[in-house]
Image (spheres, rainbow, N blue to C red):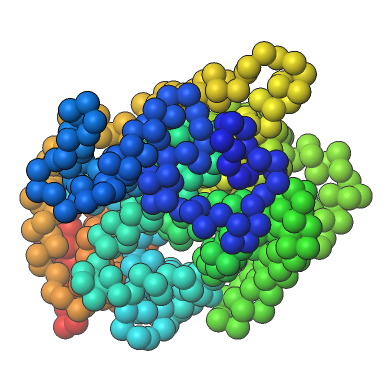
Amino acid sequence: MITGTATSGQPAEEPPREGSDPDDTLEAAAVDGTAVAEPGDTADAQAAGEAESGAAGGATAAVEPEERPGGEAAPRPAARFLRSHRHLIAVSVLCALSSVLSCSLSLLRFAHFQVATYDLVIFDQAVRGYSHFSAPTVPLRGVTGGLGMDYIQLADHFSPILAVLAPLYWLHDGPVTLLVAQAVLFALAIPFVWMFTRRVLGTPHAYLVSMAYAISWPIAQATAVEFHEVAFVPLLSAIAVERLHAGRRLPGLLAVLGLLLTKEDLGLMVAGIGVWLFFTGQRRLGAGLAFTGVAVFEVVRKFLIPLAGGNPAYYTRYSKLGEDLPQMLWSAVTRPHEFVGMLFDDHSKWDTWGLLLWPALFVCLLSPLVLAALPLILERLLADSDNWWSTGWHYDAFVVLILLMAGVDGAARLIRWLERRGVPRPGHGLRLAYAAAVFAVAVTTVPYRPFDNLLSPDFYHSDPRTEAREQAMSLVPDGVVVEASDDFGARLSGRTTVLWWDYQKRGTPWIVASVNNDLRGVVDSYLTEGYELRLDRDDIVVLHRIGA
């Protein structure tokens, strides 16, 4: 396991013990500047040390800079602060830019009616329930599934962590809050990626890998499909891996607890983290986390979700392997060839494998840390639903950060292997080459994923039907129940109770929808059943039930 720091630039083999490194924080690293002594980093560290030594002897009390021996002026306090905190400031700026990038994509799509009712409105309704100190009911999901208006989000997916977003709804009540929160949560993982990479490879490398994560295609894809519980996972998994790698068990285990409260199947990720720790020397802790992850996964699915009114079998679609985890594991043991074959039996699965491993240049396969991501990948690719196999949704964002960190660890292991075999001085050059390649790969994926929209001038132009859409929404009063097509649901959710318009005759007071010629007959059928047409413009209709 690669942790610790060494002044020679060679990472320590053993993880630091709890409390062994009092300066193991981003700010301390920024002040110290010597956690990993890399070529090109040493000069900066020396400069920072000179700045601090220049502060001694009353330099801070002087209004004018003091003269050093030889006539050189000591740096001013502001300059000393900027120099000693340069990494903290730089990483903070990187976080801010990452947030702006994701926010820009999300909010422009929201403004242009490009966000979908599923699943953004579901999470909006759940968090609104928490913010009102009531149950996280999701009428949209409940009514669509024939489960009623009082169906709660915990019966669908076990995500009590959504409650931490409730205070944000006291400031602004609506789906925009979730889009901004997700962008910020994605960005907050960057400091932990930075600290992990700096400790293992070096400082310039940490910036390159952090930027690669910020623009990575899984983050872009998750941003483009609005909001999901995955918003918490990169941050929590980064804290868990980085802190446990640094020997800081308490914050690492708190992050693991957060993962268990994010979604029912993240117990599998926790089990994977436990396996990683077990194989890197922390056997007792690793075995405990592996057992806990599997146990929580089973308890949540078989007891807590049914207790909330859900059906755990709804998302368990593994007809070829078994009905639950024990049966699947037994199938893997008794029919290993069939088990492995299912991971590669469709071209979309090959695409997913390649796109997941390529950002880390496949080097993540050299690190035991890849075991933390493997259970969630297997869960997707072994399922019956081809929807889970593709890279068109948010599922890849669950594991992207672990795979990138595994790539960093794998690169360090590969370099040490080369050094032991007498390759002359491969260290710094290969480390920097790897980090630069990871960043370059991330850049090359941008034109093929949603962040590319921000490079297109047309993306900033309003839809020609925007005026008609705004007029349609203005006709719907606040506080009513309204069925909406995909493009209207999120825009109405902040002030109405939104249901999905799926052409079922429910007697809903209001309907707002974009229609095409195929749906004109459906609209006419509503008019014969007690509805009046309040607007019909640019293929946008507003229907109101008479007397409602």
Q: Please give left or right for residue 143 compared with residue 329 in the image.
A: left
What percent of the width, then of the height, locates residue 479?
Answer: 20, 79
Q: Please give left or right for residue 413 compared with residue 75 in the image.
A: right
What percent of the width, then of the height, locates residue 349?
Answer: 63, 36
Q: Splitting the image into 4 quarters, where does residue 282 fall? A: bottom right
Q: Splitting the image into 4 quarters, where does residue 136 fall? A: bottom left
Work out whether residue 210 can be spotted: no
Closer to us: 534 or 39 = 39
What percent of the width, then of the height, locates residue 348?
Answer: 60, 34
Tell me which residue sits at (46%, 79%) in the image: 151
Closer to us: 424 or 339 = 424
Tell me which residue sits at (14%, 62%) in the image: 473
Q: Quadrant of the N terminus?
A: top right
What is the residue that sits farthest to the right in this orientation? 334
What is the residue that sits farthest to the bottom in this orientation? 134
The count of marks equals 0
Q: Can you say whether 239 is above or below 250 in the image?
A: above
Closer to us: 401 or 252 = 252
Work out whether residue 32 can be spotted: yes
Q: Splitting the image into 4 quarters, where does residue 365 fall? A: top right
Q: Quadrant of the C terminus?
A: bottom left
Q: Can you say whether 61 is above or below 132 in the image?
A: above
What is the residue that sits farthest to the top in this orientation? 424
What percent of the width, then of the height, locates residue 175?
Answer: 28, 63
Tell me which residue sits at (69%, 27%) in the image: 416
Q: Can you say whether 13 is above or below 21 in the image?
A: above
What is the residue that sits farthest to the front in this orientation? 69
Q: Please give left or right for residue 423 compared with residue 530 in the image.
A: right
Tell me which residue sits at (62%, 32%) in the image: 10
